[in-house]
Amino acid sequence: MSEEFLKVARAAREAAAELAPLPRAPKDRALRAVADALVAHAAGIVTANAEDVERARAQGTSEAMIDRLRLDEDRIGKIADAVREVADLPDPVGEVVRGGTLPNGLELRQLRVPLGVIGIIYEGRPNVTVDAAALCLKSGNAVLLRGSSSAYSSNTALVRVMQEALAGTEVPAGAVQLVPGQTRDSVKELMRARGLVDVLIPRGGASLINSVVEESTVPVIETGVGNCHVYVDAEADLDLAVRILVNAKAQRPSVCNAAETFLVHRDVADAFVPKALRALAEAGVTVHGDAAIAAYDAAVVPATEDDFAAEYLSLDIAAAVVGSLEEAVAHIRRYGSAHTDAIVTRSQRAARRFVALVDSAAVAVNASTRFTDGGEFGFGAEIGISTQKLHARGPMGLPELTSTKWVYTGEGHLRTSEGTVVAG
Ligand SMILES: NC(=O)C1=CN([C@@H]2O[C@H](COP(=O)(O)OP(=O)(O)OC[C@H]3O[C@@H](n4cnc5c(N)ncnc54)[C@H](OP(=O)(O)O)[C@@H]3O)[C@@H](O)[C@H]2O)C=CC1
Ligand SMILES: N[C@@H](CCC(=O)OP(=O)(O)O)C(=O)O
């Protein structure tokens, strides 16, 4: 392991021990200081970000990906607002999860405690640098941030501003660390830092997730790609379905909760598909449809298996006609990524069945898939969206960044072969 990596990892470990026992008030004061500093230094952060954007443009990066990378003063204001929202949330640390008095008189409590040092490897969205740091600090954890090399200048500036702001507070500035280096070696170092890092969260595409899951000796909480579906049921309000579909696809196509496929019940296909194709075309979306969808419009590109498996992250969507709700569910199980899938229906029975059958982190009923987001769920932000089942599922906010500890209090309780003896 490089000296540079060991230096920041050890500093984070020391800071984590100092941060863990802090009560809520100093953590909230520190988060508000971070939010103020981000706004005060917005111009400098935008200048650093412009270097990343310029480099990305020179490398031919798509506009959708540049949109993820780009910061302006307005976006920095929103990032600061998210930090303030996290400060306003209750502190998860110390919360009693379960507890009571056992028949032998022992008082037993399960308390939330910080995880310790959290490592996060993430995509080229600099807002994640601040979201992750804010959530980690509030939940009493130190964080090692390994953002995309494409956002290195932005992340360096953001971490500097956060550390300088923390230096004037009771929260140790060392609790927020940027992992040094822009090569994949730094990802490997995080994966091998068992004992220094308590949990590693890979947030990005399949290649990242697979390599971390296979190679990490540090425990991992996986996030995952978003191949999200909108299913338009036989009993859907079709105007509503068009609006939900267009929002799910086009409101921000580059994010993981954007829809990538729509499925429509054949009983309403004639009424729905032409309207949907018109609305999607107006929003600039290219539809890759099966033969039944393609029959409605020459502009539809014939879909292949790859289209149904694709996470486009662009203004493209796959589409198919299905014979039943069960067929829609079978399609989602085959091609989906267990992130977010939606049904549009007026039937409560159909909604209940879809919710029961679709095994995804989030299921939306008569709502856009775009709501699977920590901010929208009221978590202030999210450190990632887990598409696996342990130890967290869906947008991960403050409680997901904690573990628990059992505390039991007696009066000299002893466990003997005859049962409990109270010696006190
Ligand atoms: N479920 C969720 O919470 C989220 C899911 N996503 C998904 O992430 C994808 C988009 O992310 P994208 O911008 O492509 O980010 P990438 O997956 O390409 O990169 C994310 C980070 O992982 C690193 N990385 C990528 N591949 C590897 C690898 N094989 N080994 C080691 N490190 C690696 C990158 O480093 P470097 O940049 O230096 O190459 C970067 O820091 C989409 O699929 C999206 O759905 C995104 C965010 C949230
Ligand atoms: N937080 C996001 C959704 C999840 C996410 O982070 O997506 P991504 O852009 O793929 O990193 C949003 O809707 O704004």
Image: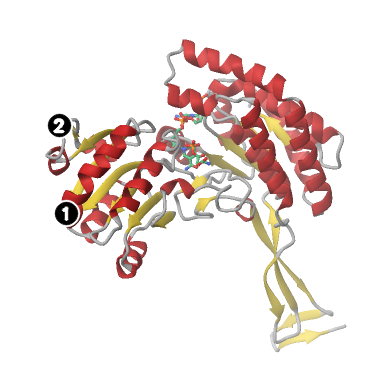
Residue at 16% x, 35% y is 297
Which residue corresponds to the image point at 51% horizontal and 29% vertical from the top-left? Answer: 68
- The quarter of the image holding the N terminus is top right
Say above or below: 30 vs 112.
above
Please identify the quadrant where the C terminus is shown.
Answer: bottom right
Q: Nearer the viewer, residue 245 or 278?
A: 278
Q: Residue drawn 60% across and 16% down?
A: 50
Q: Nearer the viewer, residue 79 or 25?
A: 79
Ligand 1 within 8 angstroms of badge 1 C-beta: no
**Label 1 amino acid?**
Arg
* Residue bearing mark 1: 266
The picture places residue 104, in percent across and down from the top left corner, at 73, 86
Residue 283 percent across, percent down from the top left: 35, 33
- Classify 65 as above or below 389: above
Helix, strand or loop at label 1? It is helix
The image quadrant of residue 107 is bottom right
On screen, residue 151 versus residue 9, left or right, reads left
Residue 325 falls left or right of residue 389: left
Question: How many residues crowd mark 1 within 10 Å: few (<14), some (14–19), many (20+)?
Answer: some
> Residue 276, can we see it?
yes
Question: Considering only vertical position in the picture, is 96 above or below 218?
Answer: below
Tell me where residue 276 appears, x and y as whole percent: 27, 43
* Label 2 residue SS: loop
Q: Name the foreground residue: 71 vs 360.
A: 71
Q: Do the numbered discs 1 and 2 sit on residues whose CB atoms are within 8 Å?
A: no
Q: If you read the primary sequence from the N terminus, does the residue marked by circle 1 or circle 2 appear first?
A: 1
Q: What's the CA distance linking mark 1 and mark 2?
A: 19 Å
Q: Residue at x 41, y 35 (%)?
A: 253
User: Mark 2 is on which residue type?
Assistant: Ala
